[in-house]
Image: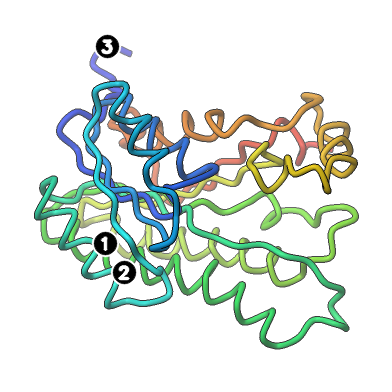
Amino acid sequence: MAGTSFRLDGDVALVTGGASGIGQAIALGIAEAGGKVAVADLANADFESTLGQIASIGGSAIAVPVDVTDKAQLVAAVEKTEAELGALTLAVNSAGIANAAPALEMSQEQWQQVYDVDVTGVFLSCQVEGAAMLRHGRGSIVNIASMSGTIVNRGLLQVHYNSAKAAVQHLTKSLAMEWAREGVRVNSISPGYTATPMNTRPEVADQAIQFAADTPLGRMAAPAEIAGPTVFLLSPAASFCTGVDLLVDGGFCCW
């Protein structure tokens, strides 16, 4: 449609989990679309890889060490972003962890750790990012959920992760409705199996083959294939989209 823009020129984005995997691909995608990027991740993360890739395409990016379970660190991250890049108008919350255990054997500590990062971390990130965007009168947030919030993965014993990602989907819808009249859109992306370093390690090679075989498109996604839909939801092209959970799963949830 004439006038529809998928560009992010003039926008400033904070991407949690931006130093690797899906978060890194999204940070690069935002930069390719013209946005400035604050790459937020744990202090010991490899920021240089993401920053180097963004610099190689002429983009602008900074490293922002942050633990998403610590609200004070998130506040400082937004302050640093705005001081160095400008007013925050975009955010992608991709920081997350995963592990597996049978429900009857799962410790409370294991359960809580996944919820602390994958649910509370997303909420706190949205809370701090949203506060900045509401002050500016506009903004767009995308939370990275998972198809595991919609289906239960065959062969994976991860009741904590599955339920946490379902919580992210509904958290997204709830925030979208709170902020819809204030100029801030909130959506989520639910990736299917994606060829991140976690899923391409030699020790999970057999499992990765099964992931691909179980996906209608016959393969796992490349991280960049999650970035495109994310940039769309951030962009003016998605200006009438809020409260959406977009499955990017190669057809997996059609089975």
SS category of the residue bearing label 1 = helix
Task: Evaluate if marks 2 and 1 touch, with contact meaning CB atoms under 8 Å apart.
Answer: yes
Q: Position of residue 27 (x, y in %)?
A: 38, 39
- Disc 3: CA contacts within 10 A as few (<14), some (14-19) or many (>=20): few
What is the quadrant of the N terminus in the image? top left
Residue assigned mark 2: 127
Asked whether, in this view, residue 110 is left or right of residue 28, the answer is: right
Q: Are marks 3 and 2 in contact (CB under 8 Å)?
A: no
Residue at disc 2, secondary structure: helix
> Could you tell me which residue is drawn at 39 percent across and 49 percent down?
92
Q: Which amino acid, by three-letter code, is at mark 2? A: Gln
Q: Find disc 3 in the rendering and name its residue.
A: 2
Task: Give the amino acid type for the residue marked by disc 1 in the picture.
Answer: Gly
Horizontal and vertical percent position of residue 248? 61, 36
How far is the residue under mark 3 from the one under mark 2? 34 Å
The answer to which of marks 3 and 1 sits earlier in the sequence is: 3
Residue at position x 77%, y 27% in the image? 219
Q: Residue at label 1?
A: 130
Q: Nearer the viewer, mark 3 or mark 2?
A: 2
In the image, residue 55 above or below residue 107: above
- Residue at the location (68% across, 41% down)? 192
What residue lies at 47% left-to-right and 35% top-to-bottom?
25
Residue 148 is tagged as none
Cα–Cα span, label 2 and label 1? 5 Å
In the rendered image, is residue 185 in sight? no
| Mark 3 → mark 1, Cα distance in angstroms | 30 Å
The amino acid type found where label 3 is placed reads Ala
For marks 3 and 2 on the same chain, the one whose residue lies earlier in the sequence: 3
